[in-house]
Amino acid sequence: MKKATGLGVDLVLVAPNAKPPVAKLIDFAKFKYQQEKKEQTSKKKTSVQETKEIRLTPFMAENDLNTRIRKAQKFLAGNDKVRFSVWFHGRQITRKQFGFDVLKTAMAKLGEAAAVEQEPKFRGKILQMTIKPNKVRQAPSSKSQAPKE
């Protein structure tokens, strides 16, 4: 304690149950600051993947579908999952095939940017399908090819 007060630092007990107890002479405020910085940098490195929902209808216009697909591409580029929900109203439920066709068209337009995570499935009057961003491998660069003669 005398040595800690003489140096103007804090005495921190590291292992109180050890024989003899282990203590450190450190500036506790600086130590806490460094710990908070470590926690902040570790939080920055973790990416949280969210699930975004896009609502469709079985009899929607081509342009409306294209608009929603562009939105899905933005979500996928941001490394988020996308849930397509096809909502059936009234007697539309009798034409379930149109809902599957809309989802098939959406996947065809997204191309290789997305992979199906959950196949289309009915939940009441809603047909849902979840897709995730596809990890596309980049082709090797042209520099690695043999030199031209």
Image (cartoon, rainbow, N blue to C red):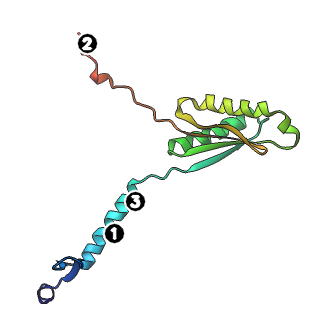
- Looking at the image, which residue is at 55% across and 34% down? 115
Q: Quadrant of the N terminus?
A: bottom left
- Looking at the image, which residue is at 21% across and 83% down? 10
Mark 3–mark 2 distance (CA, rounded to whole Å): 48 Å
Amino acid found under the numbered disc labelled 1: Glu
Q: How many marks?
A: 3
Q: Which mark is residue 36?
A: 1
Mark 3 neighbour density, 10 Å: few (under 14) some (14–19) many (20 or more) = few
Name the quadrant containing residue 103. top right
Q: Nearer the viewer, residue 16 or 13?
A: 16
- Mark 1 or mark 2, which is nearer to you? 1
Mark 1 neighbour density, 10 Å: few (under 14) some (14–19) many (20 or more) = few
Secondary structure of the residue carrying numbered label 1: helix
Q: Quadrant of the C terminus?
A: top left
Sequence order check: which comes first, mark 1 or mark 3? 1
- Looking at the image, which residue is at 35% across and 64% down? 39
Write down the residue under mark 3: 43
Write down the residue under mark 2: 148
Q: Is residue 38 left or right of residue 123?
A: left
Q: Nearer the viewer, residue 124 or 100?
A: 124
Amino acid found under the numbered disc labelled 2: Lys
Residue 142 vertical position relative to residue 85 in the rendered view, above or below: above
Q: Which mark is residue 61?
A: none
Sequence order check: which comes first, mark 1 or mark 2? 1
